């Protein structure tokens, strides 16, 4: 118990030191960089992009990989992995919060299996929701599924959602679905 408590205190202390280093130094020395990434915890996470760039510049792949592990296990949840730096950091605007790479919409579609989720979306949405999608021209895509543009569920069920613009065949698919439901019996 005491050891656990002491360890937690030590972590708080090293986070504080790392925070101070980041605040006061514009150019980090290799040993400062090492300290911040290895011991900085949340302080390192809050400046992950800056630290990543310095570590890459210094050729410290070991520190890059430690930072990546820290981010991917304790950082913000739900973002897709960046194909460039390997951090799970693709923001809703499709840019990587760490290295700045912008991924294509195709990449997002593939990573989150848009096609499968789109089929489920079509079958489970109301005509009003489908019409909303047609009006806006895009859908929301998250880990848990595809949603109409104004769906409140999208952001409740997913920490992060991406905008997917519908292609012509997808628009036709929705129109087809709406028509099939409105057939007079
Ligand atoms: Zn990246």
Image (cartoon, grey):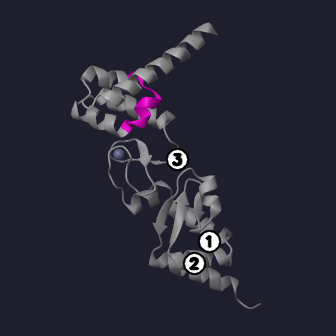
Q: Is residue 19 left or right of residue 148?
A: left
Q: Is residue 148 left or right of residue 14?
A: right
Q: Which residues are magenta?
A: 38-48
Instruction: Name the image quarter holding residue 127.
Output: bottom right
Q: Secondary structure at mark 1?
A: helix
Regarding residue 167, the answer to whether it shows in the image is: yes
Do callouts 2 and 1 mark residues in contact (Cβ within 8 Å)?
yes
Residue at the farthest right position: 185
Q: Quadrant of ligand 1?
A: top left
- Looking at marks 2 and 1 on the same chain, the residue that comes earlier in the sequence is marked by 1
* Tag shown at residue 78: 3
Magenta-drawn stretch contains 14: no
Q: Is residue 12 left or right of residue 178?
A: left
**Separation of residues labelled 2 and 1 (CA atoms):** 7 Å
Task: Name which residue lies at 48% across and 73% down.
Answer: 166
- Looking at marks 1 and 3 on the same chain, the residue that comes earlier in the sequence is marked by 3
**Separation of residues labelled 3 and 2 (CA atoms):** 28 Å
Q: Is residue 10 left or right of residue 50?
A: right
């Amino acid at each position: 118990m005491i050891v656990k408590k002491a360890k937690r205190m030590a972590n708080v202390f090293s986070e504080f030191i790392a925070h101070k280093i980041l605040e006061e130094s514009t150019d980090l020395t290799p040993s400062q960089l090492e300290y911040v990434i290895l011991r900085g915890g949340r302080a390192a996470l809050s400046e992950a992009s800056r630290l990543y760039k310095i570590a890459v510049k210094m050729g410290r792949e070991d520190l890059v990989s430690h930072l990546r592990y820290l981010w991917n296990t304790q950082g913000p949840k739900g973002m897709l992995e960046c194909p460039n730096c390997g951090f799970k950091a693709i923001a809703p605007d499709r840019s990587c919060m760490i290295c700045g790479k912008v991924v294509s919409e195709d990449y997002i579609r593939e990573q989150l299996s848009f096609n499968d989720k789109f089929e489920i979306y079509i079958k489970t949405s109301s005509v009003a929701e489908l019409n909303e999608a047609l009006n806006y021209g895009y859908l929301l895509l998250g880990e848990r599924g595809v949603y109409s543009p104004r769906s409140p569920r999208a952001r409740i069920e997913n920490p992060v959602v991406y905008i997917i613009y519908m292609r012509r065949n997808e628009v036709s698919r929705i129109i087809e679905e709406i028509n099939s439901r409105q057939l007079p019996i």
